[in-house]
Amino acid sequence: MVPVIDPCSFSSSARCTTKHLNLMLHVDFESHVIRGKVALTVEMLEDKCSSLTLDTKDLQISKVAANGQEAKFALGAKHSFNGTPLEISLPFELSRGQHVIVEVTYETSPRASALQWLTPAQTAGKKHPYLFSQCQATHCRSMIPCQDTPMVKHTYYAQVSVPKELVAVMGAVGDGQEPDPQDSSRTIYRFRQAVPIPSYLIAIVVGVLESRDIGPRSKVWSEKELVDQAAYEFAETESMLKTAEDLVGPYVWGQYDIVVLPPSFPYGGMENPCLTYATPTLLAGDRSLSGVIAHEIAHSWTGNLVTTKSWEHFWLNEGHTVYLERMIARALESEQYRQFKAIGGWKELQDTVNLFGQSNPLTNLVPSLKEVDTDAAFSFVPYEKGFAFLYHLEELVGGPEVFMGFVKSYIQLYAYSSVSTEEWKNYLFTYFKDKVDILKKVDWDGWMNTPGMPPVTNQYDNTLADVHSLPSQAKEEDLASFSDADVKALSSPQLTEFLALLLHQNPLPLSHVKRMQEVYNLNSIKNCEIRFRVEMILWVWLHLCVRARWEEAVPLAFQMATEQGRLKYTRPLFRELYNFEKYRQEAVNMFLQHRAAMHPVTAALVARDLKVEQAQGQTE
């Protein structure tokens, strides 16, 4: 088989593969850099190997050695978003199957795209700084010189030196701590990840952290101001883990901890092994939001244990994870609830396709990412188009129980390895050998390689989604008929659906939006404690308000866009405010004012939406 080459990586993954990393990291909060040494154990895949290439991005490389001997190295041309190849010449030649330990001494940039350094003012405690990494998709190379591609999986051991008043945690199992022998004001924390992972799953968090037990194999970590609330919110973690194990087999990672990050974290969650990241917007008092944790738990099998071979096949991670997440919801809630979530996902997919454009190749399930920034390509497509495809196959082969048999078998077969769409498809045909004629009738090209919405529109049970949509149908003379009874009996997910239905139609007249506020009192959500209970509801409601050009809602929209950094909320709100011409310049000014506090990925994507010149951002 011809090796799959990752267009998002410079590393020589066809010639060699990393088996283990040994990391020594010194976290410097004054300089906003990590000074590190990494020893990579590399196995050769070809004969007569005397060189290799690693991925880097904005790293200062000071020394390279191979098996203890000094090795020559050179940095190649800098790419605008993929970084810079590190070319290493070995002082000897190796044959296929032989190993070499390559040591690289380096320092990160204060602008490393994987790292966000927070001032004390940006934390809950207000006294000490904070650091967290976010390496997905191609940012680990700005923190560690490595083969930064999901086709390469390795174990790692890490020693992390931090100021002694702070605590370090990683996406790995803790292996003790000790005073730093080089500096009595610092502590070294040790970590061991014994299951092979791709580089994008390496994670580090440093701050004034406390933990609470939430299960026999789980703790929740956060600043002390939030830790008890977080422990309450994630109390159902063990039941979700057990449900997932019933569906797809044993959890192999040992520990399943959750760390609640500061508000600037750009995603709802991130599935780092042994240490799931969670946004504080999940501290909601509304267990319907636990779907985010169910999603990250599902990644323990689909994404972490079985991994996409390149970012072009990202749907293998996310489509299967959404499918498994909703099967967990099916087991814990009901089949109707799974169908309800699928309807919401289909609408998310429609919104994404409309935003990107019906003919945009990035809406392919398997897009080409040659010379494409993975951050710019990130969307709901691999999640929801991937789920829709798997659901379509489920219906063709005989229902959820039958298809889950395939998913479990697929995970068991490809555990600890990386997979391409072609390999997945071949196994699908092998597993369902008695249904090959059915599978051959699938529009494979339409699903995989065609932009826009899928070639098949799945039919879902809309019992829970059949909510009242009076505002979209009402005429001016009907406004008096609006009543709080329209929404009083709705759950938070149903109220979100009620409002989301309106986003898929022409903008409501301002009179309708004002009447909705008068009757439903949705602006009362601006109270902080209540807002975090129904964050999604507020976000959709503010969309409707700004789209209707209701100026009274603009300050609240700006507040939500800047108080937290979750991309799902921040980016669309800034886009909506930018489209309100009267407030366009204020949207730009507000972004520039808050840009320094945003995560680098969030800042870059919002800047692109607001047409803010990159050079302008770099000078701030």
Image (spheres, helix red, strand yellow):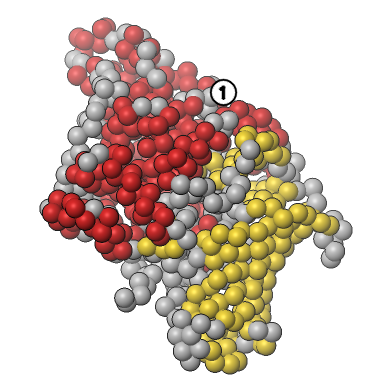
Compared with 539, 142 (above or below) is below
Taking the spot 72% from the left edge, 55% from the top edge, the residue there is 175
Compared with 519, 556 (above or below) is below
x and y percentages locating residue 423 in the rendered image: 31, 63
Q: Give the residue at mark 1.
A: 529
x and y percentages locating residue 74 in the rendered image: 55, 84
x and y percentages locating residue 488 in the rendered image: 38, 12
Compared with 468, 422 (above or below) is below
Seen from this angle, which residue lies furthest right?
184
**Residue 477 is drawn in which quadrant?**
top left
Taking the spot 32% from the left edge, 77% from the top edge, the residue there is 2
Is residue 15 found left or right of 123 in the rendered image? left
Quarter of the figure that contains the C terminus: bottom right
Is residue 510 found left or right of 87 in the rendered image? left
x and y percentages locating residue 574 in the rendered image: 41, 41
Quarter of the figure that contains the N terminus: bottom left
Is residue 326 found left or right of 59 in the rendered image? left
Number of numbered discs present? 1
Is residue 484 found left or right of 296 in the rendered image? left
Could you tell me the amino acid type at mark 1? Glu
Tell me, yes or no, if residue 72 can be seen here.
yes
Compared with 304, 591 (above or below) is above
Tell me, yes or no, if residue 550 can be seen here.
no
Taking the spot 42% from the left edge, 46% from the top edge, the residue there is 248
Taking the spot 30% from the left edge, 23% from the top edge, the residue there is 464
